[in-house]
Structures are given as C-alpha cells and as structure tokens.
Image (tube, rainbow, N blue to C red):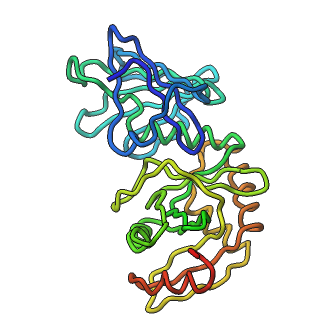
C-alpha cells in the first residue's frame, strides 16, 4: 500500500500518486514486476475519488466496443471506462493532456469497496497510456512473443491470437540462457543505431512478463504448418503483417503516420521471415541451426 508508485515499462516511467488521507494505492498481477523506485517520470498521473456522471462532455472520438470510449474536450483526452457488471455508468474517467505527459484519474466511489487499496491504472488504462505516449514519435506496441537468447539477441515472434505466440514461449522457456520478455505484447523503441524490444505486463495465456529489453535481431511472422520452414519476406509484405499486429491509436492521424514510418524502418533494417512451425522442439533446432537463438 502506498500514496505514490512508479512503474517503468519499456523505459517509460509512470508516476502515480494520490492523497493518502483519501486513498491508498497498490499494484496487482504482472505489473508488480515493473515497479521501480521513485524516478523522474515521463508521465505523471494523479488519482482521486469522484462522483462521476453518466454524461461525458466533449466530442466522442473513438469507441472500443467494449470497456472504453475516448472523448476530446478543450485539447484534453478523456477516457471513459464502463463494465458490463456495472451498467452504462462509468466506473473510471481518465483525463490526459495533449502530449500524454500529465493525467488525472477519477474513480467512481460508489463502485469500490471502502478502505481497500486500489490500482487506478488497472488494464486497459495502463496500456492506453503507454501506446498513446509511444505514438508521439517514440515507439510501437506489437502483438508478439519476445525472447532474448543466451547471447543477448532479441527475437520477435509476431502473430494475432492463436498464431502460436504462447506456444513458442513455452518451447523456449527451458532453453539455457533464454529469457521470455512476453508471450503476447512487446514494445519496440528506437535505440539509436538499433531497434530495442521490451517486455510488458500484458501477457498472454502462458503468463510471461518481464521488464527487460534487448536489441532486436530478427522478426518471425508465425504460421501453423505441417513442418518447420523459415521463408524470407520482402519489406513491403513484412510491413503489412507488422501493421496488422500493431497497436496504433487509430483515432490519431499523426500517430498512424508515425507507426507506419517506424515499422517501415524496422522491416528495411531487420531481417524478417515467415515461420511455419509445428509445436515441438524441432522448430528451435531449426532456428538455432539458421542462426537465431545461438
């Protein structure tokens, strides 16, 4: 329990605070591995209780179709969160400035137990903060399994749900020296002359989530197959597959433009392949023989 917490995801620090006389903070699940000591935050968020209204002011910009909607009002971004269990009344509203560097989260008091610590950035808000901050020229989140081999090289296995990301993570988990950063969502950022990949708290069914990072060495677009096969991809084909598995803010023209440009840089500088595989150790042997994972 605390009145101030700091989390670092892909080198991005979020500073979360509250009034200790009114609220106590906590972090749950995989996000606990991303807690850090107080540091200079890239994004500061203040959490308070409130009596939230059914109505939300401003222009409705985007509807996720499930838990959240985005509004804009006077240059600010307003994320409105609802739950099927609670009806149409918002249980949380997050207001962020234009650059996603300062925010305020209000929790509807009636929907939370009294005197129980809370995590105001509970998913999907923590992910929304990061993806929108990244889209301002800083990086992109990818639907992928990321692992670091014993030599410190980063290998990215990209695919939508069901493509085999968690399966690939499990196959590698007992490999000597291998570290699984995530089995579902990985962040890519500019590392100067290289692209760096990072783990996130938003894991898949295998539950892998580490805060580490590594230089991106190669990219594999997963496909279930009757055998194991690595096929090189031309940049234009790799770009389309990458974008289909990315998390850009579709409501931001500038964010979309940056995401496409950033992914284009990756596919032109990092080897990209289609990887057809069967779910056993033979695919790892193939990749090691071809140079990945060695």
Residue 192 on image: x %, y %: 77, 50
Please, is residue 215 above or below residue 86 in the view? below
| Quadrant where the image shows the N terminus | top left
Q: How many marks?
A: 0
Q: Residue at x 46, y 71 (%)?
A: 176
Of 242 and 82, the residue lying toward us: 242
Of 178 and 183, the residue lying toward us: 178
Residue 246 on image: x %, y %: 57, 57
Q: Residue at x 35, y 23 (%)?
A: 25
Residue 124 on image: x %, y %: 42, 41
| Quadrant where the image shows the C terminus | bottom right
* Horizontal relation, residue 98 to residue 5: left or right: right
Residue 181 on image: x %, y %: 48, 57
Q: Residue at x 44, y 26 (%)?
A: 5
Please, is residue 43 above or below residue 283 in the view? above
* Quarter of the view holding residue 162: bottom left
Please, is residue 219 above or below residue 12 in the view? below
Q: Residue furthest bottom?
A: 227
Of 205 and 112, the residue lying toward us: 205
Q: Residue at x 55, y 88 (%)?
A: 229
Please, is residue 124 above or below residue 155 in the view? above
């Amino acid at each position: 329990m605390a009145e101030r917490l700091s989390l670092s995801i892909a080198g991005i620090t979020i500073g979360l605070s509250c009034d200790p006389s009114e609220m106590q903070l906590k972090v749950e699940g995989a996000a606990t591995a991303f807690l850090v000591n107080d540091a200079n935050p890239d994004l500061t968020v203040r959490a308070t209780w409130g009596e939230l209204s059914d109505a939300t002011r401003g222009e409705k910009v985007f509807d996720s179709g499930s838990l959240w909607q985005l509004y804009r009002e006077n240059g600010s971004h307003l994320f409105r969160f609802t739950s099927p269990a609670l009806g149409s009344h918002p249980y949380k509203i997050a207001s962020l400035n234009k650059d996603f560097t300062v925010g305020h989260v209000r929790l509807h008091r009636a929907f939370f137990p009294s005197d129980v610590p809370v995590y105001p950035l509970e998913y999907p808000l923590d992910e929304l903060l990061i993806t929108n901050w990244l889209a301002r020229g800083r990086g992109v989140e990818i639907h992928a399994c990321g692992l670091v081999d014993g030599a410190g090289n980063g290998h990215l296995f990209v695919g939508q749900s069901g493509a085999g990301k968690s399966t690939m993570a499990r196959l590698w988990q007992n490999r000597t020296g291998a570290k699984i950063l995530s089995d579902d969502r990985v962040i890519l950022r500019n590392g100067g002359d290289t692209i760096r990949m990072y783990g996130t708290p938003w894991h898949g069914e295998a539950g892998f989530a580490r805060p580490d990072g590594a230089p991106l060495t190669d990219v594999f677009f997963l496909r279930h197959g009757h055998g194991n096969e690595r096929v090189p991809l031309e940049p234009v084909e790799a770009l389309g597959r990458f974008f289909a598995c990315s998390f850009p803010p579709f409501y931001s023209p500038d964010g979309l433009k940056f995401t496409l440009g950033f992914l284009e840089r990756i596919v032109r500088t990092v080897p990209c392949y289609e990887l057809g595989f069967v779910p056993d150790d033979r695919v790892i042997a193939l990749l090691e023989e071809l140079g990945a994972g060695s």
